Image (cartoon, rainbow, N blue to C red):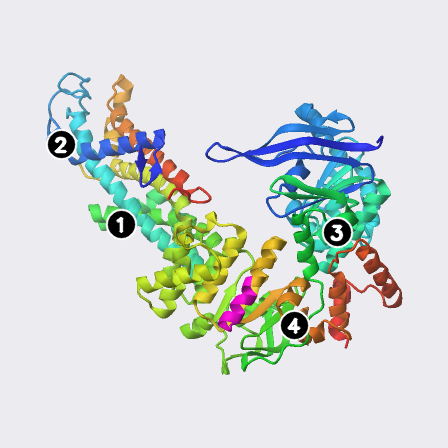
Amino acid sequence: MRLLGHRLSGGAAVGFAIILANIVAISFARWIAPYGEADLVGDVWAPPSGADWLGLDNLGRDMFSRLLFGGQTSVSLALLITALSFSLGIVMGFTAATTNRWIDAALSRLVDIIMAIPQLILALMVLSVLGTSIPVLIGTIAILDSTRVFRLSRAVAMNITVMEYVEAARLRGEKLWWIMRREVLPNALPPLIAEFGLRFCFTLLFIASLSFLGLGVQPPEADWGSMVRDNATAINFGGIAPLVPAAAIALLTIGVNLVVDWFLSIHGRAHGEGA
Amino acid sequence: MTDEILRITDLRIAARTEEGEEKILVQGIDLTLHRGEVLGLIGESGAGKSTIGLAALAYARPGCTIIGGEIRYAGTDIRTLSRRERRRLRGRRIAYVAQSAAASFNPAKSLYRQVCEMPVRHGLMSYAEAKKAAAQLFAELDLPSPETFGERYPHQVSGGQLQRAMVAMAMSCRPDILVFDEPTTALDVTTQIEVLAAIRKLVRDHRTAGLYISHDLAVVAQVAQRIMVLRHGRMVELGEAAQILHEPREEYTRRLVSVRAAAAPPAEAAVAERGERLLELNALGAAYGRLRVLKDVTFSVRRGETVAVVGESGSGKSTLARVVCGLREPAGGSVRFRGELLPPTLSLRSRDQLRRIQMIYQMPDMALNPRQRVSEILGRPLSFYFGWPRAKVTARVEALLRMIDLPVEFAARRPGELSGGQKQRLCIARALAAEPDLVICDEVTSALDPLVAEEILKLLGRLRDETGVAYLFITHDLGTVRRIADRVAVMLQGAVVAEGPLAQVFSPPYHPYTEALLASVPEMRLDWLDDTLRRRAGRQGAEGPVIGAAAADRFALGT
């Protein structure tokens, strides 16, 4: 099997399959789900049965349906936040690496200050002041996350900007934006993509911890992270309820990372053959 | 013979590519080495010299495997030894001297610690004994104050001294065989002499056998009794040094010899004055903090002219290039281009001014973006400077490729799919795409194999005649200067000590530094090193050491 002109490895095929299955399930949740998101359908933590084949949750809602609806929130939020934090972090990081050292110092110290405060506490502060709407949530986590991306992209870009092809572009009179986009970015892509896979999963979990503290996604809306938290105590009674959303997070994480690995393997090649 | 120490028969080494295919690197190599004998291995990159040298330690680089043949050290095939036995042999009986001493030493440990490590680890000497032995080696290698030399750290000694310290490290266990892998390639010509002389003396005194790997035939001929010429992992020719130099049997060897010989003939008569003044440097200065790296540099380049700037590393010649192209702000003086004053920094120069001065770099690998295709690399200057539509750019890219003798299909390739020489051609084409008046060539041939470098020089010459471009040619290689330059500026510690037409600067009466430089260029004869050392010794008696940083000041001040 081939994709974008590259041979698809076994792992990558599995990864794509997982992601595809997730996307389909989530986007058609309304039609697939047997019950509504907030419908109470039976006993608290009822074990899996023919009708509710993943069992019921802490309030007696159907786990499978909530998983599908929760996925909508979790995945789209995580994706949006990661994409945002990467755009922000990369632009800042590259700017710091390609312009003069004053801008670099200013940006770096700013990031240091943000990073000096524990991320969760800072997020709590911002969210409790500005309120817990979804846009605020996205903005806050994206900005906090972008500090990590900034560090990585700055370090990677530093190694690239000393190359003579970047100097040649400068000598030609190219604008900063062009240099960042055409000379630096393509060469910085591999480590950044690997980081993207990781960050995506961290974001998923971070939303979960905020939801747990009541500052993330608000009930009765479901999301995978809060589903784990809500059902966590079931583990004491031998229930599988918290394992179901956890497994969903794990599965998607593995799928994303399998694809990222494959992407790295085709881009890491020295000669870029086959492209 | 009884004193035979190493015999390699039918050596075959293969590398496994990423796709899992096997690629033969070295094939059918036989060689013998006797005590006290040095065998030179010569060839271009990819010839398998280093691979063979490492195989003498029964070592193969990661990804490579020795797939056949025998490597007999003192009678036993070391390929059959256990890993442990082999490890006892390496460093102790057979040692390796790498090309870049700076990369091979640990900057955080003193030289003593590193030079003494091997005998102590192998349990041959105590640390105190090893230190004493090391000091003695330092003395034999003519290192300054041998007793305390080892207390310094790698960054506290010069490149040539560090390279000799590495020879001392390799000698620390008094091995039977030393493998030298291009030990002088990274050094300046004047330093190269010191290291060569030290290596030769040491090998003679200790009757150590040596494998001397180099791409420079003239250098190898100074230390080796026999020379093996390699190409594509196979032996081309093996013979006495004199025979290889003077009566090469194979065509390939002849070509190698003639490239070096071509550099030797004296310059032709002075070239007629070229056109108007293109670039005028007036009392130009530059500094890194308090360190002045350029001092009152004044000379000019005319249209269509090639001016070579020569000097050793640290002479400021690369800084000069950076000031001219606007990457570094001058600390004084002025740069005039086409009669007008050039703004000091890049951002202040107009696009047209930038277009008219282009640059070609030493390392084509680093000068080309590995993620861009050739069409993009060559097309960008065209669309950027001239704003041409796509069709016109494509046509021009094809014309440029033809100009540098590359197939038009290369437009779709990426730099990684080209050879070193082809990459450098591409860099030349990129510079010329902008239709510049002046191209700054910063050591453009020094990273290339001699035969490839020769072709690049020819190409540059031809393109100059076709386009009328002027070159500011920065190099440390005097052979190259003789081939291509109309005028020469000799730099020493940031100052121009001699400047003028090639024939005038390179013929008597010389400036003493020019003479020292010229005398340091290895010549294609066996007794060159002896002659040079003798000449130098004579002069040293009269007026102290002549070469090296200590003497540099005197040249700068004198005459």
**Chief SS of the magenta region:** helix
The disc labelled 3 sits on which kind of residue? Leu
- Asked if labels 1 and 2 touch by Cβ distance under 8 angstroms, the answer is no
Q: Is residue A12 left or right of residue B131?
A: left
The disc labelled 4 sits on which kind of residue? Val
Residue at 46%, 51% (x, y): give it.
B415
Q: Quick one: label 4, few (<14), some, or many (20+) residues within 10 Å?
A: many
Q: Of tags 3 and 4, which is closer to the observer?
A: 3
The reply to whether the magenta stretch includes residue A174 is no
Q: Are marks 3 and 1 on the same chain?
A: no
The disc labelled 2 sits on which kind of residue? Glu
Q: Of tags 4 and 2, which is closer to the observer?
A: 4
The residue tagged 3 is B245
The residue tagged 4 is B488
Q: Quick one: label 2, few (<14), some, or many (20+) residues within 10 Å?
A: many
Q: Where is the C terminus of chain A found, in terms of image quarters?
A: top left
Tag 1 or tag 2, which sits nearer the N-term?
2
